Image (cartoon, rainbow, N blue to C red):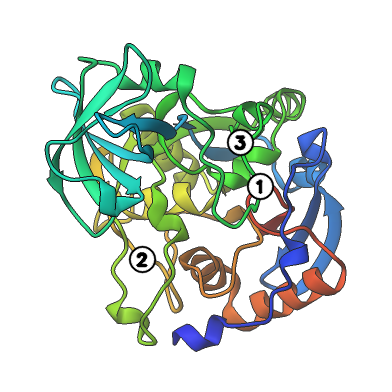
Amino acid sequence: MKLSDFKFNFPKSYIAKYPVSPRDKSNLLVLDRETEVMEDKKFTDVINYMSKGDVMVVNETRVFQARLYGKKEKTNAKIEVFLLRELNEEDSIWDVIVDPARKVRIGNKIYFNDKLWCEVIDNTTSRGRTVRFNQPGNVFAAVEKIGLTPLPPYIKREAEPADKENYQTVFARVDGAVAAPTAGLHFTPKLLNKIKEKGIKIVPIILHIGLGTFRPVEVEDLTKHKMDSEFYEISPKTSDTINKAKASKNKIIVVGTSATRALESSITASGVVKPSRGWTDMFIYPPYKFRIADIIITNFHAPESTLIMLASAFAGYDFLIKAYKKAMKDKYRFLSYGDAMLIK
């Protein structure tokens, strides 16, 4: 497959700027890989594709308030600091992106309020910096009070107070993501209770989604694209539950491309999920043989994105492109706050 295979016209008006309320009333396009039949449903209908004994895998990563605005020491120049990931918790050292980058040099201090500031200790890329915060230990707690929700760059508006909750899944538990695992945004406590009552086991994994999820693929030959590394973790309990369900011929329903990548990154040669903790830069694109997921729930993604490539590897390229054409014709809502697909 080539990058140009995933290029199509994509009107900006299809991008959802706000989620529907309640979340589980979003539209759902169901794709049957065997028959290549598509059905228009509501998200609450996902439960009809699950049976007792099945396992649903969800990503427990939590989006933290990663966008900070501060003032540079001495000049008081306004600087945006976008937190990417924590490098050293004890010393409060982080990878960040700064804007305007030309004003930020090694040794500069940036003040966010009278309690929180950081010092630039290294340059990483043209806009990237490594900084040390004055808060030892939990920087997440400090930025939660003063930071803004890191809405995706394609949502052309400022973050609002409601986004702090809207851009967070009901599974969110562990700080570390700068982008939400968007397939999970459709679930509500009410829907989850119905799923549990039906006898479906819900198990967590963690994959902290980074800005790389929005990074465009810039090479025509997909084999030459390099994904950003993201931290993931799969517990012994989760892997054991998944492996037992697979052995019993129950379905594994994976919520989102991030959870799918975490699972595929942790498979042994014998085809079972092993408990694991580390970093993955796995890039999944057609052709690819998935070994764990029987059903994937995902959103409608941007053209030429790594996310649409993973979805097409699972659904089949031609079938997925046909589904996207139908979704655009029927005015489905796209991207993070948009509608969903269930591919079975």
Q: Label 1 near label 3: C-beta < 8 Å?
A: no
10 Å crowding of disc 3: few (<14), some (14-19), many (20+): many
Q: Position of residue 271 (x, y in %)?
A: 33, 55
Write down the residue under mark 3: 167
Q: Position of residue 131 (x, y in %)?
A: 20, 35
Drawn side of residue 97 relative to residue 43, left or right: left
In three-dimensional space, the C-alpha distance between marks 3 and 1, rounded to whole angstroms, equals 14 Å
**Quadrant of the image occupied by residue 171:** top right
Drawn side of residue 97 relative to residue 187, left or right: left
Q: Secondary structure beneath disc 1?
A: loop
Task: Tell me: residue 44, above or below residue 280.
Answer: above
Q: Residue at x 32, y 63 (%)?
A: 227
10 Å crowding of disc 2: few (<14), some (14-19), many (20+): some
Q: Earlier in the sequence, mark 2 or mark 1?
A: 1
Q: Residue at x 82, y 33 (%)?
A: 22
Residue with the most extreme front position: 75
Nearer the observer, 209 or 18: 18
User: Which quadrant holds the C terminus?
Assistant: bottom right
Q: Earlier in the sequence, mark 3 or mark 1?
A: 1
Task: Tell me: residue 19, above or below residue 134.
Answer: below
Q: Secondary structure beneath disc 3?
A: loop
Q: Amino acid at mark 3?
A: Tyr
Q: Position of residue 122 (x, y in %)?
A: 12, 44
Drawn side of residue 51 relative to residue 22, left or right: left
User: Which quadrant holds the N terminus?
Assistant: bottom left
Give residue 157's mark: 1
